[in-house]
């Protein structure tokens, strides 16, 4: 769960880098952060890849930590007589 929270906190940072670099390249007079880089296609692709990797790691870390109504957490299916009420 801690890994899931950590990666949830990391998700917006690649987007911030892209927005800051595009803003600076368009002439915005914002304070430059240490993470600011010049806007380029490479930066955009790197940040997009980082978002995908962060989301995948968070999804893997959170897999199975939350059960659902069908018993996915324990790997069991509902009894046949209960299956219709759960599935509908």
Image (spheres, grey):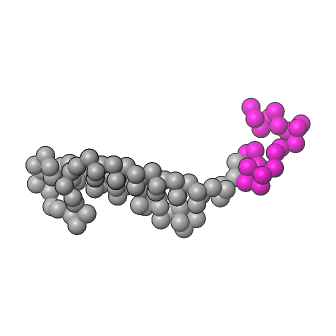
Magenta includes 83?
yes
| Residue at 63 percent of width and 55 percent of height | 63
In which quadrant of the rendered view does residue 61 lie?
A: bottom right
In magenta stretch: residue 80: yes
Main secondary-structure element of the magenta-colored stretch: loop
Position of residue 23 in the picture relative to residue 64 (left or right)? left
Q: Residue 34: x and y, percent?
A: 22, 67
Q: Residue at x 26, y 47 (%)?
A: 41
User: In screen coordinates, is 16 left or right of 83?
Assistant: left
Locate residue 75, reporting x and y percent.
Answer: 78, 52
Q: Residue at x 82, y 37 (%)?
A: 83
Nearer to the camera, 65 or 21 = 21
Quadrant position of the N terminus in the picture: bottom right
Nearer to the camera, 30 or 56: 56
Q: Is residue 7 above or below residue 52?
A: below
Q: Which residues make up the magenta segment?
A: 69-88
Closer-to-camera residue (49/19)? 49
- Can you say whether 15 is above or below 9 in the image? above
Q: Position of residue 13 (x, y in %)?
A: 35, 58
Which residue is rendered at x = 87% and y = 42% of the image? Answer: 79
Task: List x then y, in percent, for residue 60.
Answer: 58, 57
Quadrant (top left/top right/bottom left/bottom right) for the C terminus: top right
């Amino acid at each position: 769960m801690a890994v899931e929270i950590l990666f949830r906190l990391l998700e917006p940072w690649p987007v911030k880098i892209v927005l800051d670099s595009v803003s600076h390249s368009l002439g915005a007079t914002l304070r430059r952060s240490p993470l600011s880089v010049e806007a380029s296609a490479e930066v955009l692709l790197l940040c997009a890849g980082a978002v995908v990797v962060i989301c995948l790691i968070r999804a893997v870390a959170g897999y199975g930590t939350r059960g659902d109504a069908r018993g996915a957490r324990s790997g069991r299916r509902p009894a046949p007589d209960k299956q219709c009420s759960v599935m509908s």
